[in-house]
Amino acid sequence: MKTLQYFLLLAFLGILVIAVTSLPPRGDVTAPVHQHVNPAGTLVAGTYFIQHAYEDTKTPNMVTVILADYRAFDTMGEVIVVFAGGIACFFILNVRRRKP
Amino acid sequence: MIEFIQGYYAYIFLAATFTIGLYGMMMKQNLMKKVLGMSVVAACTILFWIVSAYKDGAGVTVLDKRYGVENPELYLNPLPHTLMLTAIVVAVVTLGVALALLIGIYREFKTLDEPTLLERMK
């Protein structure tokens, strides 16, 4: 059984390596993801955010702008996820001991 | 050959790390080690996105007053980083709930070893 599991893991590693080596190499500017034209008419999906982030919000960090301004509702949903996790931890850890 | 290594070493390293995380989840008997394997897999997936967002000649996604925004190719695409920030939050919450469950299991059965646990649950 253990041998089968090791064999499965090795096969999975082989599949992963074959899959990643058929991607464009790291940092290649001619890769399709860096050539795609977005609905705003410019290259790369994030170009609109790069060009408008500072004008819109006066915050230099673009990741912050997207996370907390353009996608603020998504971040509010994240807060709900964290809250649910905290409540779950609270109730799991507060469960009463079973009397022996 | 050198170009191949420079282009793909990060991807191959991440594939190996992902498999190590799966190994921890599949083969280890201790539940804590299984949770650690799950955490490694999550971190590996996030790093894969960050690596594939890299672009030659581009800097971090913080506005540099010297360059301005006339040339967007001077900055990395900020979208993968943002989405992975969201994914990190979900991964951390999953890890926290898993650890709380482990604490509950340990309080109830005084062990985290899987065969011993199955024995004591009978």
Image: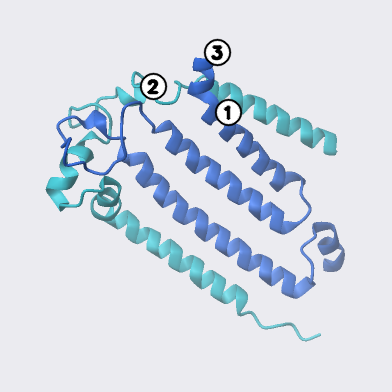
Chain colours: A cyan, B blue
Q: CA distance from mark 1 to mark 3?
A: 14 Å
Q: Along the horizontal axis of the image, is A36 left or right of B51?
A: left
Query: Do badges 1 and 2 share one subunit?
Result: no
Residue with the mark numbered 3: B1
- The residue at 55%/41% (across/down) is B44
The residue most toward the left is A55
Using a 10 Å C-alpha cutoff, classify the residue at mark 1 as few (fewer than 14 neighbours), some (14 to 19) or many (20 or more).
Answer: some
Judge left or right: residue B14 versus residue B105.
left
Task: Say which quarter of the image contains residue B64.
Answer: top left
Amino acid bearing label 3:
Met
Mark 1, secondary structure of its residue: helix
Location of mark 1 (residue): B12
- Whole-angstrom CA distance, mark 1 to mark 2, is 16 Å
**In the rendered image, which residue does mark 2 sit on?**
A28
Residue B26 image position (x, y, % from top left) = 73, 45
Q: Who's the residue at 43% across and 38% down the image?
A: B50
**Quarter the C terminus of chain B occupies:** bottom right
- Which chain does the numbered disc 3 sit on? B
Name which of mark 1 and mark 3 comes first in the sequence: 3
* Residue plotted at (59% across, 44% down): B41
In the figure, A22 relative to B83: above or below? above
Farthest residue, direction top: B1
